[in-house]
């Protein structure tokens, strides 16, 4: 049985600035670390995130424990609606459907929401506990990332 995790935070940047960073693989790697690390297969350093694209990444828990290949299929990547929706999963968590939604508050603040549907069979409650911590961590890291000097 699947469960839904939902976390929201006000981020210290306009929606446009956040959207630009959402398009970068290194942003995902930064906000996920150290809870999870993602390394693209084939040594790719960048991706073009857009609707219909499919990605495979090596996933490690806390950068140490290999969990196999994590796949991401981007179903919606909509700049106008400030929405990203992906179907993700791996051997241990076959269903990890992730919605990211941005809602501008003003020019310097945006409500950022992660909503994740998780189904890992009997492991679902444990995975959801980890996901609650992971998404709280990610949103703290987003705040830190947005305060760093631009690359």
Image: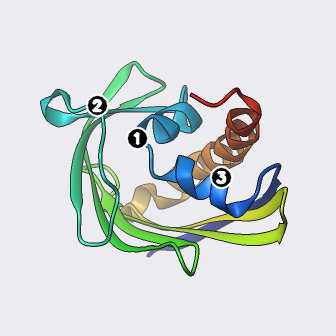
* Residue 56 location (% of width, % of height): 21, 47
- Marks 2 and 3: in contact by CB < 8 Å? no
Q: Compared to 24, does 3 lie above or below?
A: below
* Residue 125 location (% of width, % of height): 55, 58
The label nearer to you, 3 versus 2, is 3
Q: Give the Cα distance between marks 3 and 1.
A: 15 Å
> Which residue lies under the disc numbered 2?
45
Circle 1 — which element?
Answer: helix
Between residue 33 and residue 103, name the one nearer to us. 103
Circle 2 — which element?
Answer: loop
Disc 3: CA contacts within 10 A as few (<14), some (14-19) or many (>=20): some
> Which residue lies under the disc numbered 1?
25
Lower sequence index among marks 3 and 2: 3
* Residue 59 location (% of width, % of height): 32, 35
- Marks 1 and 3: in contact by CB < 8 Å? no
List the single residue furthest toward the left. 42
Between residue 91 and residue 142, name the one nearer to us. 142
> Which residue lies under the disc numbered 3?
17
Query: Residue 144 occupies which quadrant of the picture?
Result: top right
- Marks 2 and 1: in contact by CB < 8 Å? yes
């Amino acid at each position: 049985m699947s469960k839904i995790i939902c976390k929201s935070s006000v981020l210290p940047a306009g929606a446009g600035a956040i959207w630009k960073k959402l398009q970068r693989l290194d942003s995902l790697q930064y906000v996920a670390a150290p809870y999870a690390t993602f390394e693209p297969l084939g040594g790719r350093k960048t991706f073009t995130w857009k609707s219909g694209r499919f990605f495979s990444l090596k996933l490690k828990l806390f950068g140490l424990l290999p969990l196999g290949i994590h796949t991401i299929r981007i179903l919606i990547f909509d700049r106008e609606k400030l929405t990203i929706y992906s179907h993700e999963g791996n051997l241990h968590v076959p269903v990890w459907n992730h919605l990211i939604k941005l809602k501008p508050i003003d020019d310097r603040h945006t409500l950022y929401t992660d909503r994740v549907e998780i189904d890992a069979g009997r492991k679902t409650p444990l995975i959801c506990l980890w996901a609650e911590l992971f998404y709280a961590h990610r949103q703290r890291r987003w705040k830190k990332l947005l305060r760093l000097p631009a690359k």
